Image (cartoon, rainbow, N blue to C red):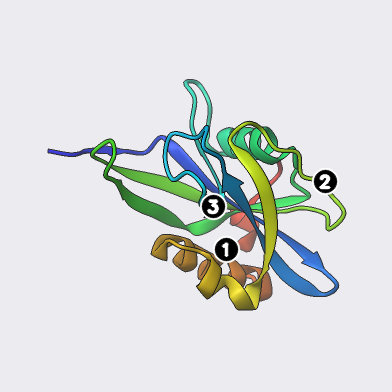
Amino acid sequence: MSDIRADGIAVYVYRVQGGQLEFLQIHRTDATGEYQRSWQIVYGGIEAGETAVQAAVRELREETGLTPRAMFQAEYVETFYFRAKDYVLMMPVFAVEVAPTDTIRFNEEHDAARWVPVEAVAGQFMWRTQREALAIIVEEIRHPSLARGQLEIRP
């Protein structure tokens, strides 16, 4: 029987550049354990004694060097069967806004970055759960819900 784990986070980084909403993808290197040479978002593990929010901010800094300008919890949990390790992973989803002029600094896991315009998301994000999460995030950015005040996070 496969295990079910809830020890990871998913962070969708966005910026508004010239009035256009864009989402960050970072390219995984051969040094990563899985999904080498694929374009991904910021994914990471929750360490012992750490909350999911703390893990999201830490992973964002470790993988990109970025600091959140604004942050909110999306009303979505990514669920993914991780075949290589035979477990189902459930990850809370966070949206992080950064300044359009912020500089990305990579760790050994990543070697490139690209900003994907919101209109191109469907053709650039490989996982269905990423596209679903992005649809919810975009809706929340464009039309904040009644729950927005409860979803906002002060990093």
- Circles 2 and 1, Cβ within 8 Å, touching? The answer is no
Q: Residue furthest top?
A: 48
Q: Relative to 130, is 81 above or below?
A: above
What amino acid is labelled 2 in the image? Thr
Which callout, 2 or 1, points at the residue further toward the start of the chain?
A: 2
Q: Which mark is residue 40?
A: 3
Which callout, 3 or 1, points at the residue further toward the start of the chain?
A: 3
Give the image location of residue 48, x and y in percent: 47, 21
Q: Relative to 129, is 71 above or below?
A: above
What amino acid is labelled 1 in the image? Ala
- Residue at x-position 83% and y-position 54%: 99
The residue that mark 1 highlights is: 147
Residue 145 visible to an observer of this rendering: no
Depth-wise, is mark 3 or mark 1 nearer the camera?
3
Which callout, 2 or 3, points at the residue further toward the start of the chain?
A: 3
The quadrant where residue 143 appears: bottom right
- Residue at x-position 26% and y-position 44%: 83
Q: Which mark is residue 103?
A: 2
Q: Quadrant of the N terminus?
A: top left
Q: Quadrant of the C terminus?
A: top right
Classify residue 68 as left or right of residue 149: right
Depth-wise, is mark 2 or mark 1 nearer the camera?
2
Q: CA distance from mark 2 to mark 1?
A: 31 Å
Residue 19 visible to an observer of this rendering: yes
Give the image location of residue 112, x and y in percent: 67, 48
